[in-house]
Image (tube, coloured by chain):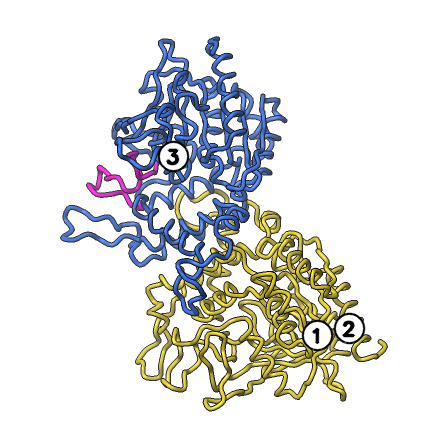
Chain colours: A yellow, B blue
Amino acid sequence: MNDQQTNPGNSVGIVETRLVTLFSEASPLPLDCGKSLGPVQVAYETYGTLNEEGSNAILICHALSGNAHAAGRHHPDDKKVGWWDNYIGPGKPFDTDYFFIISSNNLGGCDGTTGPSSVDPEQGRPYGLRFPLITIADMARLQKALVDHLGIKRLLAVAGGSMGGMIALQWALDYPHMVPASVIIAATPRLTAQNIAFNAVARQAIMADPHFNGGDYYTLESDSSAKPRPESGLALARMMAHITYLSEQGLHERFGRKLQDRESLSYGFETDFAVESYLSYQGSSFVKRFDANSYLYITKAMDYFDPFPDAETTVTRLAGVESRFLVMSFDTDWRFDTSRSKELVRILHRSLKDCTFQEFASPAGHDAFLLPHESYEKSLGAFMLRIWQDVTGGTP
Amino acid sequence: MNDQQTNPGNSVGIVETRLVTLFSEASPLPLDCGKSLGPVQVAYETYGTLNEEGSNAILICHALSGNAHAAGRHHPDDKKVGWWDNYIGPGKPFDTDYFFIISSNNLGGCDGTTGPSSVDPEQGRPYGLRFPLITIADMARLQKALVDHLGIKRLLAVAGGSMGGMIALQWALDYPHMVPASVIIAATPRLTAQNIAFNAVARQAIMADPHFNGGDYYTLESDSSAKPRPESGLALARMMAHITYLSEQGLHERFGRKLQDRESLSYGFETDFAVESYLSYQGSSFVKRFDANSYLYITKAMDYFDPFPDAETTVTRLAGVESRFLVMSFDTDWRFDTSRSKELVRILHRSLKDCTFQEFASPAGHDAFLLPHESYEKSLGAFMLRIWQDVTGGTP
């Protein structure tokens, strides 16, 4: 999705992922499950410049399979740009001429931040399923430590799409004095039974893979040859999820019933339709860059997310929240459809929070939040500029 | 879904599945793929009595995973009744006081009719993936041979839901003089890219199972012990499909975020939510009764179904069609949603066919066509009675 050419004039240019180790065995990161983790490595990138007052920092939160590389390129000849390059850069909604953008790989991930594929210091080998279960709040807690490490006392905003929007919401609840604005896009205050069902089948696909081996599929230095990984299970999980990221309309317009590299039906079990070939490609390319155990942990964190389980908790949790909210959804998104965003808006409005909601038309389904879209871009840019003016007192 | 108690007064009572062998190696069933099959065994049941004129026969077509047992019980202590028992019996829409109902297991199935688990007479062992690819038209062709075998020259109607509706439509096109009425419920004139995508992932789940063994997983007499079957792959396929059979609303009302047999989250990879447990049950009970190769062949037949690929073909195919049509859909069905039924209605109306369309409200999603539903039941019953009056000249 992110392989379009970016105008160099509005790119953040060449960027690098940095690594920092936070927490230690003696002073570990406490987790909701009761366990703790330390040390914890965090992979992060920043774009733009932190101003002298340290008042222009925006934290960007990524979705299930994202990473710290949200904008720009690592190398001049990289074909792909960062996952939210459409929205981060000079003149873009997250305008690096004004803002200092922070983007980190989530806890439990597999792109530099500590997760189940990281080496457990106690055992000297990857955690696998010995990694503790993590929550969205744990992910925010680690980001909070990164923001502290960067010397930032208060953010200008926290923003994210899909699971990233859930993390942004968690920030507003857990660190109310640090978050004057929250941007929550294509997200939900809780997963539905259908969402949980899809996640559960995805996890079963991974765990049923004969190479899963209880999560211990990592090749160790002591192994004489590379261990096979649960690639077919992870590919199945990704293919199934990918169907939910696209709208029926989008799939129809792009593929319809077009055949793949053939004039007529095969009358066999080869790939007949272009959509089958596309999905297989999505599955096989995903397994090259993602860890199956991370998939298990992160989907479980999404399942568990439910900050407003009842009216009393909702009132308590929102009491001290200072953030204003921008909630956005897309009309063909059926993974987290507009009614899920509206549910969040209702919760916030009932607690008299400042909340703006917009739904946009797009054929792209859940993935729309990543793709170029003029009115979405303009609304997001206008909101961010207003926040900047209100919080910093600056004029554009 | 079919385990509710049936009022014995409106049950067809105790029924039996009969087997008949049609076609032979010398005179086989021709298939759309160019190959042929012979002999072919058909499992079927009948309910009610064929009248002297032989004019009151209705053929019922089952969906992907159905079988010939559409109504009644095989044994007095059977807990489950046939899959469409809600709609077949004395006083029910397919009223056995008036109609002679025929229900057969589809070609390619695994419940008595020849399919990939049947013994290939040439090889003396189950076909497996040597079974030829079949189409919806092939399924109708075999049913036509059964109807001929039963001495019926002309049916009163062909009816079915989901894939059964696709078979019913095929009957109207291929045997126009035999079909005065077609009832097509929760079906579609062609699968969408999204439908094909879900089917493709389901097939990949089966084929990726380590016990799939290229489709040769059947235990032969020469085997010293039972071979393992690709149960986890088939269970995954079923669980994923099952999500698409239920509406988001229905899943929410039934499960929501209820925990399964626990007071709090496990913070582990056990089953936390009731919907996970329900899906696992659906998967594990399905593998006890269904053959993985049948699943491959039947989903492929659905993918291929496309009787109206272009305007010219549509005109040609509908030119001689004599049937009147009843098309029905359910508002929360998202596997084959109402727009798919309306697409069929538009095609039929453009060719000036007599077509009635009704959409019903139900929280049950795609499965609604199997479940008790007062207005759906009344509409179906009224249509069938009108057909009976018009075709036989009888009065109720």
Question: Badge 3, how many Cα within 10 Å: few under 14, some, many 20+?
Answer: many
Tell me the number on the disc at residue B83. Answer: 3
**Does the image show residue B23?**
no
Q: Are marks 3 and 2 on the same chain?
A: no
Q: Which residue is mark 2?
A: A387
Q: Nearer the viewer, residue A53 or B315?
A: A53
- Between residues A209 and A75, which one lies in front from this camera angle? A209
Give the chain letter at badge 1.
A
Q: Position of residue B325 (x, y in %)?
A: 54, 24
Residue farthest toward the front in the current orientation of the protein: A312
Cα distance, mark 3 to mark 1? 55 Å
Q: Is residue B356 above or below residue B393?
A: below
Q: Kindly report the secondary structure that dominates the magenta region of the rendered protein.
A: loop
Residue B64 in view in this figure: yes
Say what secondary structure mark 3 lies in: loop
Q: Which residue is mark 1?
A: A157
Query: Which residues, given as a range, are shown in magenta?
Result: B108-129
